[in-house]
Image: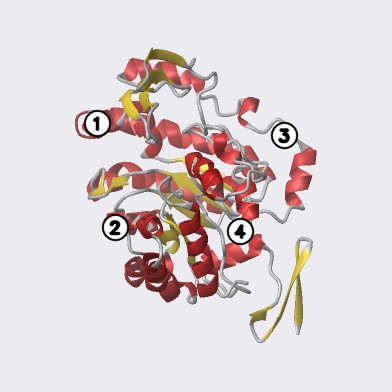
């Protein structure tokens, strides 16, 4: 019999059978393909706020607050106090492993922000400039992602101007309680702690827009390399002090570099532009004790996965089934080189009933026992999923994971 102390909790095991394990340790050990007391039970990317609002009319108690109402900017996450979707996640008895609650508040955005300004509005839509300097069109009559109209960098002069808003050591980039008391509290905490980094495709796309970025990769190669070199230096300098003072459990690189038919750039372009920066940043993170490096990208990433792994990535999310990202097949191809979070088809939850039963049996059961897999919906839970269907899914999932 052995007793291991982990924070304020302990793990007691005999012959490999774990009796008690905190959520943090369970999450980390799962993604490292190590034995755990049971599988992780969490909705990693959470829910669209509109989904929770709809569920109030379908049986979700009004006493469960919707912590996701606040709009999260594309360049950082301000949820370091574990409040984002805390209400719904506690109500559903999830492990404290949903990503938003783990993200440490480091601001990678422009300081000062661009001034938010409405350019046009009617009963159907609003066109506005957001705080990242992006002009976008938002429908007011439906739940949808915005339409992107214009981006802050059109040429080299724009780039030189916007760089002035990205001073890495500005104290405003760190939490308001930055100091010894915060460091002490985090050191003694049993909660997961993550760094969320705008990636080397995701951020240049926010600077230039997709069409301009891809075009410039062919006709303005030097300019694109200059932007990527700048972003690498900025991220490293911004993270240098937090990584020196705080132990982080994983890094989460936001990219969204693929769509249903495959990557938005070819593997050749990824190898030329993105891979060198992955190697540099991930080496930097590992030097500071961050072992789990996770990439978030929608769409079909299969052609890019070998290059991601070469760059040091060892976890992928959310594996959209509609984009042919079947977690069972991904595991067959890449084995223990890649852990997986996601891979539960949202469309099965929309259909409900037998579709949910089949989905869990087909995609969850083959993977959960061998580790390196956390079952979660293959994006935020969408508006189309009814509350009753979601509860049915959780009941089926609990039984599959043998969670009481």
Q: Residues within 10 Å of mark 4 (few under 14, many from 20)?
A: some
Q: What is the quadrant of the C terminus in the image?
A: bottom right
Element on which disc 2 rests: loop
Q: Earlier in the sequence, mark 2 or mark 3?
A: 3
- Quickly name the residue at label 4: 94
Q: Residue at x 62, y 48 (%)?
A: 61
Distance between the alpha carbons at the discs numbered 2 and 3: 40 Å
Q: Is residue 253 above or below residue 352?
A: above
Q: Is residue 400 left or right of residue 334?
A: right
Q: Residue at x 40, y 18 (%)?
A: 128
Which circle marks residue 255 in the picture?
A: none
- Quickly name the residue at label 1: 211
Q: Nearer the viewer, mark 2 or mark 3?
A: 2
- Quickly name the residue at label 2: 302
Q: Earlier in the sequence, mark 4 or mark 3?
A: 4
Give the farthest residue toward the left: 219
Q: Earlier in the sequence, mark 1 or mark 4?
A: 4
Q: Is residue 332 above or below residue 198?
A: below
Q: Is residue 213 above or below residue 158?
A: below
């Amino acid at each position: 019999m052995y007793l291991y102390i982990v924070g304020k909790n302990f793990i007691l095991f005999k012959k490999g059978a774990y009796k008690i394990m905190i959520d943090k340790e369970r999450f980390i050990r799962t993604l490292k393909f190590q034995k755990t007391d049971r599988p992780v039970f969490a909705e990693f990317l959470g829910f669209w706020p509109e989904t929770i609002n709809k569920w109030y009319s379908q049986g979700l108690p009004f006493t469960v607050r919707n912590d996701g109402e606040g709009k999260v900017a594309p360049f950082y996450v301000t949820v370091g106090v574990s409040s984002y979707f805390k209400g719904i996640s506690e109500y559903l008895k999830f492990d404290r492993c949903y990503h938003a609650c783990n993200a440490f508040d480091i601001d990678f955005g422009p300081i000062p922000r661009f001034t938010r300004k409405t350019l046009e509005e009617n009963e159907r839509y609003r066109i506005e400039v957001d705080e990242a300097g992006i002009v976008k069109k938002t429908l007011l009559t439906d739940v949808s992602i915005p339409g992107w109209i214009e981006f802050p960098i059109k040429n080299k002069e724009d780039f030189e101007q916007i760089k002035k808003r990205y001073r890495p050591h500005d104290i405003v980039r760190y939490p308001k309680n930055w100091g010894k008391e915060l460091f002490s509290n985090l050191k003694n905490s049993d909660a997961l702690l993550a760094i969320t980094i705008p990636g080397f495709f995701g951020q240049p796309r926010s600077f230039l827009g997709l069409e301009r970025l891809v075009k410039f990769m062919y006709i303005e190669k030097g300019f694109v390399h200059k932007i990527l070199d700048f972003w690498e230096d900025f991220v490293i300098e911004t993270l240098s002090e937090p990584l020196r003072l705080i132990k982080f459990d994983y890094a989460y690189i936001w990219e969204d570099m693929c769509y249903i038919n495959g990557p938005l750039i070819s593997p050749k372009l990824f190898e030329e532009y993105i891979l060198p920066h992955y190697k540099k940043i991930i080496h930097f993170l590992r030097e500071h004790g961050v072992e789990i490096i996770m990439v978030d990208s929608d769409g079909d990433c299969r052609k890019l996965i070998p290059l991601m792994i070469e760059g040091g990535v060892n976890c992928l999310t959310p594996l959209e089934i509609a984009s042919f990202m079947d977690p069972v097949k991904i595991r067959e191809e890449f084995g223990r080189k890649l852990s997986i979070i996601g891979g539960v088809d949202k469309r099965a939850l929309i259909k409900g009933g037998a579709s949910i039963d089949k989905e869990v049996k087909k995609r969850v059961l083959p993977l959960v026992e061998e580790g390196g897999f956390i079952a979660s919906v293959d994006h935020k839970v969408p508006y189309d999923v009814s509350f009753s269907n979601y509860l049915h899914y959780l009941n089926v999932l609990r039984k599959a994971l043998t969670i009481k």
